[in-house]
Amino acid sequence: MTDLAIPAVIRGRIVLDDLTRFDGRGANPSFLAPDPERLLPELPLRDPGALGALQALPFDEIVDYLARLGEHLHPDRNDRLAAALEHSVHWSDMTPPLVRSAYEQLPALFAADTVREVADTAIGIDRLDGWVELTMSDGRTAAIRAMGARAVHIIAGNSPLVAALTIVRNAITRSDAVLKLPSNDPLSALAIARTMIEIAPDHPITRHLSVAYWKGGSAEFERRLYRPTNLEKIVAWGGLASVRHITRYLQPGLELVALDPKRSATVIGAEAFTDASTLADVARRTATDVGALNQLGCLNARVIYAVTGTDAAGLARADRLGQLVHDEIQRLPAAVSTPVRHFDPELRAHLSALRTSPEYYRVVGGSGNEGAVIVSHLSEPVDFHPLLSGRVANIVPVDTPMAALAHVNAYTQTIGVYPEALKRQLREPLALRGAQRLTSLGYAAAGNTALPQDAIEPLRRMVRWIVDETCDPAMVTPLWATAEVPAESTASDAFRRTGNPLYKR
Amino acid sequence: MTTDSDARRFADDPAGFFGHSYPAMHAVPRRELTELQTAALRLRFTELRDRIAVLRAMADDQGVTALERLDDVAPLLFQHTVYKSYPVSLVTDGRFDRLTRWLDRLTVRDLSAVDVAGCVGVDDWLQALQGQTDLRPVHSSGTTGTMSFLPRTTGEADRMFRTARLGLVPGLDPFAVGTDRYRHVVWPAFRFGGSAIMQFADHLVRHVAGGEQRFHALHPGRMSSDVLFLAGRLHAAQARGDADTLDPGPALRARRAEFDRAQQEMVAGRSAFLARLVERLRGERVLFMGSWSTAYELARQAGEQGLTGIFSPESSVVGGGGAKGVALPDGWQQVIERFTGVPRLRHCYAMSEIMATHMRCAHGRYHIEPSTILFVLDPQDGTVLPRQGVRTGRAAFFDLLADTYWGGFVTGDEVSADWSPCPCGLASPSLGATIERYGDRAGGDDKISCAATESAQRDALDFLTSELV
């Protein structure tokens, strides 16, 4: 196969010059892309004042733009997406049915209702659209606006939805985005950016999105790009090493918004074992949390703490749950989950070893690429749990739901909990130990983009919060007039003693 | 035609079978070697299949009742994870009775009567096993977070060293009456330890030095297996971000002062060690064996003291596993050569799970000993690649020296094997100098590189100290 040429887009302009070859990750094919060195002079938005046109857009126009874009983003109607889908087989860790299913969700992500909800929940449309005035108790008025910023987005490529979400967020926050293409999804963001050029070539939103590929960790290139004169924010998804790598470029004036690596878990209460139909429902929900997106997401369940008890009867319950979850993973529809493309050989070696230790583990499945469930027979997760992938889960029998708490820390993102009452009971203890998102069992992979992510609100971090204060000397006593204040009041005494204007009134 | 008695002699005493000659061991034509290895493999399979619980379960599961060709053993090669397939809490909670029961499934020895009451750590447990059976279990460095335990016996270890010494010490004649029979051994490390590499010391004393009087260790004490175990857990926890919650447990805390002292003595003892070497061994033919980073540290210090060319140029200076895990400065080899006075350093490829030590030839290739059957597996699906030409893939081995546990083993190493005779003149298959870990992305480097072991041990002691402050 000849190497595919992957252009860059710089603020509405497609660049296909100075192509250079990049090696694909692992066994993936190499591809051609513009030499990042040559792109560098134009990649950052050097003049922050150029964001003015975006700030002048009414919010409704942004909503209309995104909705219209969304209507074009269906793989059956968009040649760029169709081509991206066809080529994704070379780069994506997902299988084609999953990539297609992700693309089919794009129009909904850009729909007017969705965009309004995201903007209003996270920031407030009025604060994005203009200056919101507050009168403060000290008599001043303050106008607050969430203004756009210049940002580089280092996105994850495990789902094409990350690229789309970034583009939506960039438009809502009226920002300038330089989006670094991930090597495992080099085409999705590009397909959307090119569609934007086709439907609205001169629109300010089109003119404030750039997408380009460079090899992560190219120190000299990154040192010259990541400067406060070029940008205010770096939004970084991804693995521990890549996020850690970026921290070396941080300095005053350049902020990191880290959507860093997380793991997710499940807590299943004793109520799951009430009767056969309840257990079947719990198994189906658990399988969905494990298998959706082929377990490529940080939100997927991996270790499952089940309140089965740890005596012989308890272990039998855990085994039963393991078998059912495995069966249900096999039944998930192809748009949700399929046998995986690459099964980690190291994980396979672990599965094979655990089969030799029946006193401590029961392994269901895992002979091919269909996935597996490891049932621990001691109340502890397998030591290699960070490797769990390819639709492989580890059920850990516990005597009480509180036993799961010991395994939760700042790296824990989503915890699916059954039943709801248990979730209510566990939410503070789990949150205090680091968990960031609790959800009804079965909904781990069905998030809502308007809600907080990784215990932060990314949109609030992507904007710059600007305040314009107005002080009428008749209402707010001016500092220059402090000498005229009579000396009788205690507050004034305190002010004279300390010089602290808070004592002024 | 290989007879049963040939196969028996080859498998049970490869050194004797080849007349205690390294060149003879590596001169066997391929076809003849395959015949010998096939016969020996069948012998091991027949004798072990129903006596090792894990092997029997696996063979039953795969429906393997007999082996015709070498490749037939492929489904029965143990993944490297088998020897660490115990729940880690068996160690951390001190359930050594259950750990013994787990180990029992991997050996033909009956461990059911072993009394491990009172064992509070790995050091104790290994000692209990050694005291009550002929086992000398070895463990890995454990840097992936879990330690492998392999139930090797003294008989196997002796068999291993009667062979290994031929490659390690050229010119050694174990049957000579005069000075060629033994060598002084220089060992810049602890004298004792439970890891496979640390147990080399005992074997070198017996099979190369012929007694403690010719064995020169930097430190007379023991590298604690408990500290290494903690080091592994610490390393894994750091990679996961859980290090803050790691609890070393009261047993380790109680021994902290002992560990600290040993560590300090180890560093402080270098000068005195150098002085001893100069005084006792100047101009002697020695076997110098240690990690390259330790050897370099010692050589650098010697250089600062103006000590060069200490040993006879006919000495053998051996290090294993390259300098992996530790960055050595450019020119490190010259520094060691200047210090020792030995013109060519000798590299070897070894791992705790396989007994043979595979020496690197002048053409930079690691030659596979006849007692080790080499397999190169497809890294994705694990199928055996053809035994011809040059093949790159995952290395797997069958160790014919093992007769109380199962010698079939799949490594985590990516190798490039050449099945043709080497330009150096040896007929045995060989591996290219670059050997990499498939598991590196998981943060693992469990290969026995003592370099990694030592720095990991230091980290663990630092942790233990700071944790108590």
Image: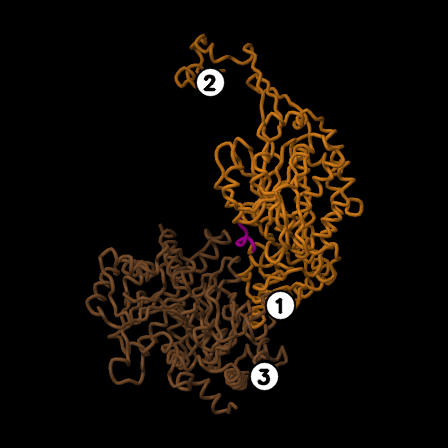
Chain colours: A orange, B brown
Q: Which mark is residue B381?
A: 1
The residue lying toward the viewer, choosing from B234 and A173, is A173
Q: Is residue A136 left or right of residue A281?
A: left
Quarter of image, res B346: bottom left
Q: Closer to us: mark 3 or mark 2?
A: 3
Which residue type carries mark 1? Answer: Asp
Have a look at marks 1 and 2 and say if they share a chain. Answer: no
* Residue identifier under label 3: B67
> Magenta stretch: residue A405 in it?
yes
Asked whether residue A415 appears in the rendered view, the answer is no
**Span of residues in magenta:** A404-409
The residue lying toward the viewer, choosing from B137 and A185, is A185
Q: What is the secondary structure assignment of the residue under circle 2?
A: helix
* Vertical placement of residue B273 versus A250, above or below: below
Residue B299 position in % (x across, y down):
29, 60
* Residue identifier under label 2: A501
The residue lying toward the viewer, choosing from B282 and B456, is B282
Q: What is the secondary structure assignment of the residue under circle 1?
A: loop
Q: Quadrant where the N terminus of chain A lies?
A: bottom right
